[in-house]
Image (tube, rainbow, N blue to C red):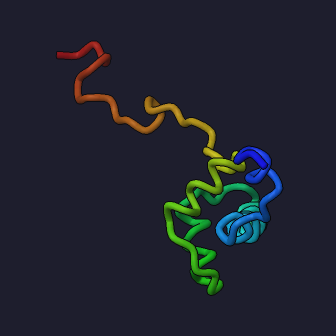
Amino acid sequence: MSTYYAAKTKAPSRRQLDDERLLVEAKRVHKANYGVYGRRKVWAQLNREGIQIRRDRCERLMKQAGLARVLCAARSLAAHTRPRRGAGTGSC
């Protein structure tokens, strides 16, 4: 049997099985928080729940699954800046 067919018929490794289990948990946490949680918060929440996972592994799994945080609507910087004194007032 060639190496290709041997690899195709081989049972999934422990890492692959753990990745599948952890990805289900990461998706659950991400969905439970309305998709707002990003990689850092999902990782922290999983660890708080007692699910031991390294940060880089959580990031890799979320990236593979296409999970990312939801960004808030962009705010205009002009609305939050104060005009400089005397600028645009017409006075000296």
Tell me the residue at 49%/61% (across/down).
56
Tell me the residue at 44%/33% (across/down).
77
Position in image of residue 7 (x %, y %):
73, 52
Looking at the picture, does residue 10 appear above or below residue 70?
Answer: below
Q: Indicate the quadrant where residue 42 lies.
A: bottom right
In the image, farthest residue toward the left: 92
Position in image of residue 39 (x %, y %):
57, 58
Tell me the residue at 76%/64% (across/down).
12
Position in image of residue 74 (x %, y %):
57, 36
Looking at the picture, does residue 80 appear above or below residue 20?
Answer: above
85 left or right of 81 in image: left
89 left or right of 53 in image: left
Tell me the residue at 70%/47% (across/down).
3
> Does the image show residue 29?
no
The residue lying toward the viewer, choosing from 12 and 75, is 12
In the image, farthest residue toward the top: 90
